[in-house]
Amino acid sequence: MKCYYDFHIHSCLSPCGDMDMTPHSIAGMSYINGLNAIAVADHNTARNVRAVTNAAQQYGITVVPAIEAESAESIHLLCLFPSVEAAEDMGELLEKNLPPVKNRPDIFGEQVIMNECDEKQGEIDVLLINATMLSVEEIKEEAEKRGGLCIAAHIDREKNGIVAILGCVPKELSFSTLELSKNAADFEKDEEYKYISDSDAHNLTDIAEKRSFLEVENLTIGEILKNLR
């Protein structure tokens, strides 16, 4: 069956995310756009993943727990996990490895934690959009240790893309899947990898602007991760 997806969505917990990117609004817009599976991948944290998962249940949408981690090299990595608990555990590690720089909401935006009813539960004080002190190799290893899948994010982009920063996708990193941005055009693909295309949405109108799909046997997190491996 076809699984229409968007595995790179930011909530209002990412300072660059619009405040309309609440758990219930994300789930509702994803349903309107005909998506079967989504992943909210906030910068270096998973504290809104559980709320989005609960909010999406009423729409029958599968939520793959996720984080967009930033390595010490300033490379963005999309990490998908088999459970909310695994994502939250990884998020704790990433947060501990962020530099102790306080967020300035007036400059960077708010970092709001919400529940599935879109009620504010708190904020994160440390600025989430900094690079962590963990290397690409360390982030990939830690994600896989938790049963997750690490994907090099938006590799066609100059900012925070692995190709722009390292000059290539190093074979020794053993990625199985790479992500292209929604605006990728004429990108030369390597047959060694699988490719996904996501919105990297920071506001509701960007979610699944261009729909992509996977062929899966069923709409479970395990089946989706199996397909991407």
Image (cartoon, grey):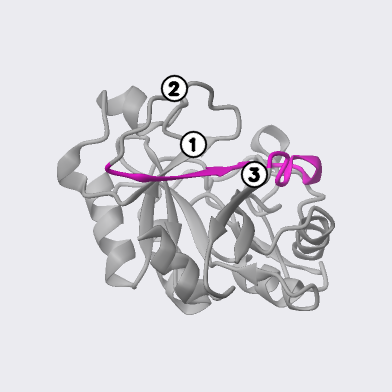
Q: Specify whether 225 is left or right of 35.
A: left
- Compared to residue 158, the image places residue 171 above or below, namely below
Disc nearest the viewer among 2 and 3: 2
Disc nearest the viewer among 2 and 1: 1
Q: Which residues are magenta?
A: 192-210
Tell me whether the residue at label 1 lies in contact with that at label 3, contact meaning CB atoms closer than 8 angstroms: no
**Secondary structure under the numbered disc 1 in the rendered image:** strand
Q: Residue at x 51, y 42 (%)?
A: 129
The residue tagged 1 is 180
Q: Specify whether 73 is left or right of 1.
A: left
Disc nearest the viewer among 1 and 3: 1
**Front position in the image: 85 or 215:** 215
For the C terminus, which image quadrant? bottom left
Q: Is residue 88 visible?
A: no
Residue extending farthest front? 1
Q: Could you say where residue 7 lies in the image, as x and y percent from the top left?
A: 57, 54
For the N terminus, which image quadrant? bottom right
The residue tagged 2 is 158
Q: As shown in the figure, which amino acid type bears the numbered disc 1?
A: Leu
Distance of label 2 from label 3 (alpha carbons): 21 Å
Q: Could you say where residue 219 lies in the image, as x and y percent from the top left?
A: 59, 73
Q: Specify whether 131 is left or right of 39.
A: left
Distance of label 2 from label 1 (alpha carbons): 12 Å
Q: Could you say where residue 182 lies in the image, as x and y percent from the top left?
A: 60, 34
**Secondary structure under the numbered disc 3 in the rendered image:** loop
Q: As shown in the figure, which amino acid type bears the numbered disc 3?
A: Pro
